[in-house]
Amino acid sequence: MQESQTSFSIKHWSDDDKPREKLVQKGRSVLSDAELIAILIGSGSRNESAVELSKRILASVNNNLNELGRLSVKQLMRFKGIGEAKAVTIAAALEIGRRRRGENAGQIVKIRSSSDAFELLQPILGELAHEEFWILYLNNANKVLHRSQLSKGGLTGTLVDVRIVMKQALELGAVALILAHNHPSGTLRPSEQDRKITDKLKRASEALDVKVLDHLIVTQKDYYSFADEGIL
């Protein structure tokens, strides 16, 4: 009986099957997502290896690491075998990955298309569980001068202070803006409120010879571009 219980432990596996040893011997890229998470949590339980536990966690989010990154520490702790320390380790590792993507995206200094804007904004907005509204300020070469959060927690006309946007545009010497907000629900359809806010900022910008180039709705994997759809 004791042998069947301990056989679930990774330490009883062959070296080729142990995630840590595999990473050292063969490199990071050969490990599955479950094996990488197993390294983070270190151990499973008497009836389940760390890899099997990791597979179960991943299965709950359809094997999507972006979805996993949205789980809170408390949500991770709902899995049997995941205490606070392991949950914090998983959350911290995924946050490092998100920030790394953000730093890579920050290297995009010139916006040539809506996809460039999406690559820059997705690491900021794509995985949030709440809505945020951001603005990219561009010069006449479409290079990003600054990116700024305009509102957080919801999108309503009262939260969009046109004066702040225009003041910052003038201070930066910006000649163009790209508006962006996320839809945590994953829907890419613009709401009537989305359209009203776009029109409000567009009219205010035109008065100062500043052009609104686009408004992006950002989700985890995709985006909606007002400019591409011809409704700007």
Image (spheres, helix red, strand yellow):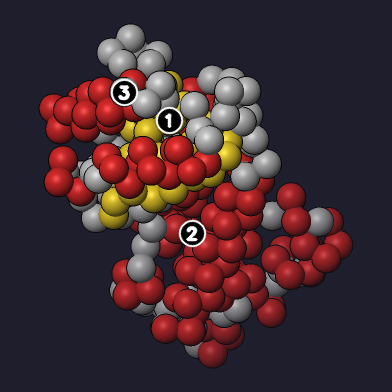
Q: Nearer the viewer, residue 134 or 31?
A: 134
Disc 3 vs disc 1: Cβ atoms closer than 8 Å?
no
Give the numbered dot on residue 55: 2
Residue 125 visible in rendering: no
- Nearest to viewer (mark 3 / mark 1): 3
Please state which amino acid type lies under the numbered disc 3.
Ala
Give the numbered dot on residue 178: 1
* Above or below 6: residue 16: above
Give the percent coordinates (x, y) of residue 103: 63, 51
SS state under label 1? strand
Residue 65 visible in rendering: yes
Question: Which residue of the protein is positioned furthest toward the right in this rendering?
Answer: 25
Give the percent coordinates (x, y) of residue 105: 61, 42
Kindly indicate the quadrant of the structure image that contains residue 225.
top left
| Residue where numbered disc 3 is placed | 207
Please state which amino acid type lies under the numbered disc 2.
Lys
SS state under label 3? loop
Q: Report how far apart the C-alphas of labels 2 and 1 lie in the structure.
A: 40 Å
Q: Nearer the viewer, residue 111 or 185?
A: 111
